[in-house]
Every structure is written in structure tokens, then in C-alpha cells.
Amino acid sequence: MACPSCFAPVFRDTKHCPRCGVRTAREELGPWMDWNCPRCNGRFAPVRVGDVELLECGDCGGAWMHPGPFERVCAEREAQAAVLARPLAESRAPAREAEKIRYLPCPECDKHMNRVNFARYSGVIMDVCKEHGTFFDRDELRRIVTFIREGGLEKSRERQRERLVEEQQRLRRMQMEIAQERRSAQPQYVRVGNDGALGELLADMFGLGF
């Protein structure tokens, strides 16, 4: 296998890349957890991938991460390298057919989690409990890391900036249209003087003396 950080050759059981020192090994940390996987109801096992700790489902290969470790994966290249080097467990859960959108329960508080498109444009829909963490289906964490490494976060920020500029321009156009409508709705007054033809006409019609 190759180191996902520097692409140097690495033996599968090697814990660190001999060239760049990135930790690549997957280490099981302890017994199975009492929490169940929200996707398939399998059991979670705590593991360390590089220096990042997470919970893995032994049945479907899903993963549960607390906010801190996930933020590290998003920000640190070494943590991303470890995720890419993480061997995906073979799923023992039955193959899922196309299903309707389902809101999964948080494995810690049992409340329904929100479905969030990572960085709005990645196409990876995560299941997020704001208080406790994020659940990833079998290959979603790897897809997120690939998205980040291909410049996806920068592209997403640029698209959001463009969207903000477009929204500001739309609001300015609306304000100008509203101001124009208000000006059009104001009554137009005509000054009538005794030296004007209109004044003479009105005087003749209504017997007004100017």
C-alpha cells in the first residue's frame, strides 16, 4: 500500500510511514460499546485511525465521530491521511435497496439527527447531532476527505461568496424598484396661475377669479 500523505510505499501492518512519519495504522482500543449503530443497529467498537479516535460499526462499516475529532480531520493533513489509509471494514449488513429519506437517531441521545450536505456542495449527506457528533455511512468519511484534498472547501467558500454577492445585488434591485413605485404613487400637483391658459379656462368654467 502507499502512504496517503506522501505516497511512499508502506507495508500494510506498518504503523507509521517511514518517509514522512504519518501514522497509518488502525488500532482497536477496547471492547464493543453499548451504543448501537443508527443505520443497522449493529454494535460500535472504538478504534484509533492515525491519531483520530472514532467508533466503527462491525456490521455495516459506518462510523461515529465526536465534533472534535471530525474538526481535526477537516483541518489537519495528517488526520486526513490516516482516514484515507483506514481499511474499510467489509460490510456484513444486508445490502440496502433504494430507500426513502430516513432521519437516523443519535446513538447517544436518541434524538433525530439532521441531514447535512457537507460544505453545502460536496454531495455527501451526513447525519449530524449538533451536541454529540456525526454519523458517516461506510465510505462517506473517505469521500469527505477526498473532497477537502481536491480543494472542495475553497471552491465551496467561493461559491458561497458569489451567492452572497448575487443576493446583495438582488436586494438592491428590489430597493430601487420599491423606491420607484413610491415616487410614482405620489400625487402630482399643478400650479394654476392667473397668467396661464389653464387658469383662464378654469376661471371661465367655475367662475373663479384669479
Image (tube, grey):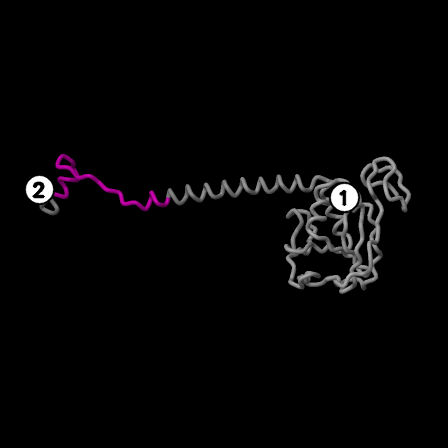
Point out the residue furthest to the front here. 30
User: Is residue 179 positioned above or below 42 on the image?
Assistant: above
Residue denoted by label 2: 209
Seen from the viewer's position, the closer of residues 44 and 138 is: 44
Regarding residue 16, the answer to whether it shows in the image is yes
Residue type indicated by callout 1: Ala
Seen from the viewer's position, the closer of residues 163 and 61 is: 61
Say left or right for 120 vs 178: right
Say left or right for 117 vs 209: right
Residue at mark 2 to residue at mark 1: CA–CA distance: 93 Å
Image quarter (top left, top right, bottom left or bottom right) of the N terminus? top right
Q: Estimate the x, y position of residue 120 in percent, counting from the top left.
A: 64, 48
Q: Residue at x 8, y 42 (%)?
A: 209
Give the numbered dot on residue 8: none
The mark nearer the N terminus, 2 or 1, is 1
Neighbor class of circle 1 (other Cα within 10 Å; few <14, some 14-19, many 20+) is many
Residue 194 is covered by the magenta coloring: yes
Q: Residue at x 33, y 42 (%)?
A: 183
Say which element carries label 2: loop
Regarding residue 98, the answer to whether it shows in the image is no
Say which element carries label 1: helix
Residue 143 is covered by the magenta coloring: no
Q: Estimate the x, y position of residue 12 in percent, counting from the top left.
A: 90, 46
Seen from the viewer's position, the closer of residues 203 and 119 is: 119
User: Is residue 127 positioned above or below 164 on the image?
Assistant: below
Neighbor class of circle 2 (other Cα within 10 Å; few <14, some 14-19, many 20+) is few
Residue type indicated by callout 2: Gly
The magenta span reads 181-203
- For the residues carrying marks 2 and 1, which lies nearer the camera in this image? 1
Residue denoted by label 1: 79
Say left or right for 19 vs 192: right
